[in-house]
Image: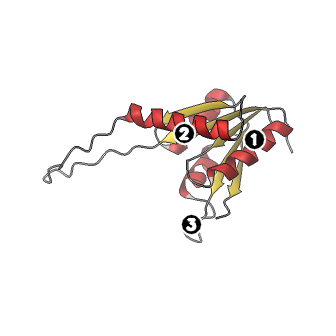
């Protein structure tokens, strides 16, 4: 195994996040590496279909979504006693934001969960699959045990 210097755990807030987080934390500790957690808030505003008027107030405060995600990430960090973890929340699409974070922060390992629920042709989930092909570094896809 390589000596990793910066390990990134890209997590969502599903029940599988703990599996990804613990695997990434263990690798970071064994390599005495910097450890970062990243959650990407993916917000897709409702689409206006031209002739169909939008009914009701569909507006969502993106800054509020990010703040809630930061609080959730902080709780997870405290729960697992991750005193030295670098906590990050970004707004955008996971593939792009994770890839950009890896480049900007010079991560050399990304740990992400894989559900494999998207058909037999895809071994990884859609996010994990997209991230796999966009990364300039090693990827560890943790098989999620449900």
Residue wearing tag 1: 25
Q: CA distance from mark 1 to mark 3?
A: 25 Å
Q: Residues within 10 Å of mark 1 (few under 14, many from 20)?
A: many
The figure's colour scheme reads secondary structure
Query: What percent of the width, then of the height, locates residue 72?
Result: 54, 39
Q: Nearer the viewer, mark 3 or mark 2?
A: 2
For the point 66% across and 36% down, the residue is: 78
Q: CA distance from mark 1 to mark 2?
A: 18 Å
- Quarter containing the N terminus: top right
Sequence order check: which comes first, mark 1 or mark 2?
1
Q: Quadrant of residue 114?
A: bottom right
Query: What percent of the width, then of the height, locates residue 67?
Result: 46, 32
Q: Residues within 10 Å of mark 3 (few under 14, many from 20)?
A: few
Using the image, determine if residue 29 lies above or below residue 54. Answer: above
Q: Secondary structure at mark 3?
A: loop
Can residue 136 be seen from the camera position used here? no
Q: Secondary structure at mark 1?
A: helix
Residue wearing tag 3: 117
Sequence order check: which comes first, mark 3 or mark 2?
2
The reply to whether callout 1 and callout 3 are in contact (CB within 8 Å) is: no
Query: Is residue 118 left or right of 20 when viewed as pictured?
Result: left
Q: Secondary structure at mark 2?
A: helix
Residue wearing tag 2: 72
For the point 79% across and 38% down, the residue is: 28
Query: Is residue 42 left or right of 75 when viewed as pictured?
Result: left
């Amino acid at each position: 195994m390589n000596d990793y210097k910066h390990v990134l755990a890209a997590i969502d807030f599903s029940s599988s996040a703990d599996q990804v987080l613990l695997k990434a934390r263990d690798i970071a500790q064994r390599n005495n590496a910097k450890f970062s957690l990243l959650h990407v808030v993916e917000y897709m505003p409702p689409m206006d279909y031209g002739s169909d008027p939008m009914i009701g107030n569909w507006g969502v405060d993106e800054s509020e979504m990010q703040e809630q995600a930061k609080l959730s990430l902080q709780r997870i960090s405290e729960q697992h006693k991750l005193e030295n973890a670098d906590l990050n929340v970004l707004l955008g699409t996971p593939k792009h934001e994770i890839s950009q974070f890896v480049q900007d922060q010079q991560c050399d390992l990304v740990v992400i969960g894989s559900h494999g629920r998207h058909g037999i042709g895809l071994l990884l989930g859609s996010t994990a699959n997209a991230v796999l092909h966009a990364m300039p570094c090693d990827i560890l896809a943790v098989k999620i045990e449900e």
